[in-house]
Image (cartoon, helix red, strand yellow):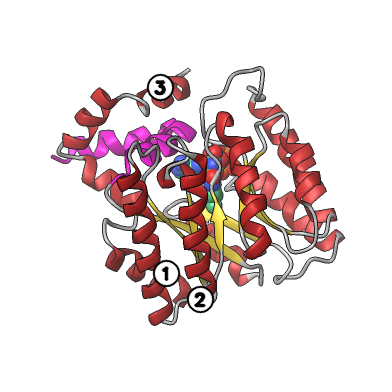
């Protein structure tokens, strides 16, 4: 119930204004977001890479409504990739991209052209791009754009969301050699017609999808903080003899950092998803919805003012 309310608030510009101007918000945002500028992104990446972690960087923003905004997002990624390369942080760091921030809602071709420019810059920087997955109305369009991008940029990866009923079948389609698939539970509010609603059904779907990916020929990226699913991932890695170059674990910046360090120390490849930028509202609300206990941060930050 609380999750539904928070995800509804994520779409409300009124609540956004309230949250953005609240005096305690900055402290809460800092836990989940590396900072606002490219320098902050580079600093966080340097620290994580020094600790033996790989990184994927997300320039925060989504649902842009003008072509100019979409071009500005593209340009931010181009300059980020150049900076990562110059700093010697590729290929340890790659980028994650939301197609809605590149104009998917305005014109699919515009989003594709912008994404292609980012893939070209990633190639030049010696690294890769992964397409984030947004709500279910965009899944087909995102997978179509992925297929087109992969023709010239075969390293391009995509996210699949275990809460969608279609995802086990999408995993089968994408479990081919060279295909990078990031499997997560899914963070949006979705109707029952397309998505499992109960946590246990989402978890079961995650395990079925994980089995398809780990037994397939592609490169699975297991994006979860869930201890049971991580243990199942470790088990399947042993079973399918997948070493650290044949799959990876992924987690979000600021969430279970001690588990990220433990897995890395065990010899697994672990990648941290690092968001940065000033358009953090939608991202923050999804993190709060996943774990309403995080609202306690708001409470504590408020109490300390
Ligand atoms: P679950 O939410 O059940 O959490 C398991 C445990 O992890 C919790 O008990 C808690 O200990 C810890 N935890 C989880 N979330 C926490 C939080 N916010 N704060 C503190 N602790 C927390 N989704 C999407 O729809 N599209 C996408 O493109 C992506 N991309 C993506 C990339 C990467 C690298 C990750 C890790 C996740 C995503 N997600 C995503 C988000 C994903 O769908 C999901 O919402 C979150 O990962 C939370 O789900 P868990 O699998 O961690 O399990």
Q: CA distance from mark 2 to mark 1?
A: 9 Å
- Judging by the rendered image, the residue that carries numbered circle 2 is 124
Q: Which mark is residue 184?
A: none
The residue located at (36%, 45%) in the rendering is 61
Q: Residue at x 67, y 37 (%)?
A: 162
Write the residue at 71% across / 52% down.
Answer: 231
Residue at (22% x, 46% y) in the render:
26
State which mark lies toward you, 2 or 1: 2
Task: Specify the quadrant of the image occupied by residue 266.
Answer: bottom right
How many marks the image carries: the answer is 3
The disc label shown at residue 81, or none: 1
Residue 126 placement (x, y as % from top left): 54, 76
CA separation, marks 3 and 2?
40 Å
Secondary structure of the residue carrying tag 3 is helix
Q: Main secondary structure of the magenta part?
A: helix
Q: Is residue 288 left or right of residue 196?
A: left
Question: Which circle marks residue 8 in the picture?
Answer: 3
Image: magenta residue range: 279-305
Mark 3 Cβ inside 8 Å of ligand 1: no
Contact, mark 2 vs mark 1 (Cβ under 8 Å): yes
Q: Nearer the viewer, residue 258 or 179?
A: 179
Q: Dot 1 lies on which element?
A: helix
Asked if disc 2 is less than 8 Å from ligand 1, the answer is no
- Residue 76 point in image, percent of width and height: 34, 60
- Whether residue 280 appears in magenta in the rendering, the answer is yes
Q: x, y (%) of residue 30?
A: 29, 51
Image-based side of 192 in relation to 32, left or right = right
């Amino acid at each position: 119930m609380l999750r539904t309310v928070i995800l509804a608030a994520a779409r409300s510009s009124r609540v956004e204004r309230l949250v953005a101007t609240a005096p305690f918000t900055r402290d809460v945002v800092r836990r989940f977001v590396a900072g606002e500028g490219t320098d902050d992104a580079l600093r966080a990446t340097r620290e994580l890479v020094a600790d033996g972690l790989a990184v994927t960087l997300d320039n925060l923003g989504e649902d842009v409504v003008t072509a100019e905004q979409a071009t500005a997002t593209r340009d931010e990624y181009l300059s980020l990739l150049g900076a990562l390369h110059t700093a010697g942080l590729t290929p340890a760091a790659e980028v994650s991209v939301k197609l809605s921030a590149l104009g998917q809602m305005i014109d699919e071709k515009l989003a594709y052209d912008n994404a292609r420019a980012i893939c070209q810059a990633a190639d030049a920087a010696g690294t890769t791009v992964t397409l984030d997955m947004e709500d279910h109305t965009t899944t087909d369009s995102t997978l179509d754009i992925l297929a087109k991008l992969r023709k010239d940029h075969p390293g391009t990866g995509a996210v699949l969301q275990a809460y969608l009923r279609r995802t086990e079948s999408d995993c089968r389609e994408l479990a081919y050699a060279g295909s990078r698939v990031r499997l997560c539970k899914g963070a949006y509010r979705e109707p029952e017609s397309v998505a499992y609603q109960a946590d246990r059904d989402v978890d079961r779907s995650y395990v079925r999808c994980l089995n398809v990916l780990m037994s397939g020929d592609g490169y699975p990226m297991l994006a979860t903080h869930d201890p049971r699913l991580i243990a199942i991932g470790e088990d399947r890695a042993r079973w399918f003899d997948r070493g650290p170059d044949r799959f990876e674990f992924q987690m979000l910046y600021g969430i279970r950092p001690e588990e990220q360090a433990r897995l890395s120390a065990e010899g697994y490849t672990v990648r941290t998803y690092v968001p940065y930028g000033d358009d953090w509202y939608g991202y923050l609300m999804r993190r709060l919805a996943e774990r309403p206990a995080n609202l306690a941060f708001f409470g504590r930050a408020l109490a300390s003012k």
